[in-house]
Image (cartoon, rainbow, N blue to C red):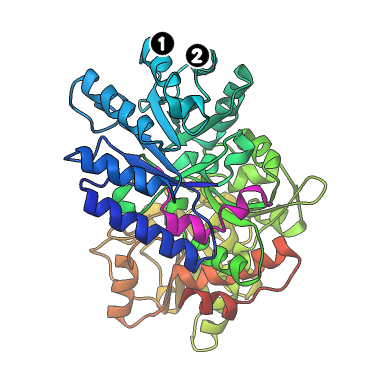
Amino acid sequence: MLCVTGTEGTLEALRRRLKRDAELAKHQAVDVPLEEIRLDHLVAIDDDTFAWLASVASERTLVATCRPVRQGGAFRGSEPERLALLRRASASELAMVDVEADVDDAFLGELGRTAAVRRGKVKRMLSWHEHSGFPKGCGERLRDMARRDVDLVKLAVTVSDASELDALDACRARTSKPCVLVAMGTAGVLTRTHYPAFGSPFSYVASQADLASAPGQLTLEQALALGLPRSSTAPLFGLVGGAQVQHSPGPRLINRLFRRRGMASSYIPIVTSSLRATLPLLERLDARGLAVTMPLKREALEVARPDPLAREVGAANSLRRREGWEATNTDVTGVRAPLEKALARLDARCARILGAGGAARAAAAACRSLGLTVEVAARRLDEAEAVASGRGRALAWSERTRGPELARSVLINATPLTGHASPWPDEAPLDVAAVFDTALGSMRSSLLVRAEASGAQVLGPMDMWLAQAAEQLSYFLDARVTVDELEDLAR
């Protein structure tokens, strides 16, 4: 179940939001059973406001909140004024009133004695928000909240890593009352997409991005694109890695693929620094396939059964669950497939690879399979030597722009540098046959812009991403997915 929220400042804007939500949900053939009304953001509230809310409450299920600044809300009036608004919301027979956990028992008892609450028409939710992090004692706080005279409780905390979500879920063992658990921030997205696994009866989504009321909140449109609420209990696929997973084209395109194929599953970006620490949670959520990116590709080998290719490369970017986790490396295809086409039009004999991480290892394997001589330049010579692996030449980082073979070389950026940050010095000529930039970013990289200006053939990160993603999804789904199909979804 979805609860759509927003931070509208006027009643007219709120009316437009409810109409827009209903139209979008109808278009997607999905019900929006809950709408949160943020009284703390409304600039003017009078008798007409509550009369209108009462009329809407006869047709829509409304949740009233008046969150003070101390809990991350916008209400700056006095506490008696705030509680008076919540009393009126209860009397207007909105379906639920959300009250902060630092109110006293007298106020909760007062709400409990209203006719609407006694008849079961209005539920009382007690909530607490920790915006500064995930402190110790959250379980005890939730336990104490649940002992009070309310119908359900909510705990929202800020997390920086998905591995913290198991600890958040453990908090609900302290209460037998229904509870809503929310992890705020991008690392907490699984509590929003797979909320039933955390015991939550619903998930908050923003009507629009500029109306979001908490960090990491999905929009209604994004939630529907993920297949929610149906996908909340379906097998999970994800992209696991550092904060850069938020910029990948994967979630947008792969969820389109799932919707087109009638699949209930969703594909979620999962921010974590430890694959090992996050896997137990992902297994509990019935994860079936994981795309792995920096900095976890080496760790992926340690938690799975690697196939010969992943073992040869020394890194894995694809894990699938088949009586345990299996691993392969589709980055090799991501480099090899587009580069093979380009080589038909090039007089190139050598590949100079910049970087020494998982992408560099995959690029080296791909280039060797195409018969290219491999040179690897990295900031640490020993890491370059490990990637060259005795079947190529390792270069110091200071030597990356030198050599007589550059004019007949393919330069491959396998570092994370992208956008305005380039691994190629501005003062060094870019006299190469081709440039293949594998680093995904939010803009076309300065390296590719320079390469085009110099007349070199260029291959970009989407060339690599599409080739590896098609093979990766085929590996996950045991069904053929093609580059053409993904390109069509990207249009």
Can residue 231 be seen? yes
Q: Residue at x 32, y 83 (%)?
A: 455
Q: Which residue is mark 1?
A: 105
Seen as rendered, the residue at the extreme bottom is 345
- Residue 107: image quadrant is top left
Please report whichever mark, 2 or 1, sits nearer to the chain's N-terminal start: 1
Q: Residue at x 43, y 14 (%)?
A: 109
Residue type, label 1: Asp
User: 99 left or right of 386?
Assistant: left
- Nearer the observer, 114 or 270: 114
Residue 229 is a magenta residue: yes
Alpha carbons under labels 2 and 1: distance apart: 8 Å
User: Do labels 2 and 1 touch, CB within 8 Å?
Assistant: yes
Label annotation for residue 148: 2
**Image vertical order of residue 328 relative to residue 488, above or below:** above
**In the rendered structure, which segment of residues is drawn in magenta?**
216-234
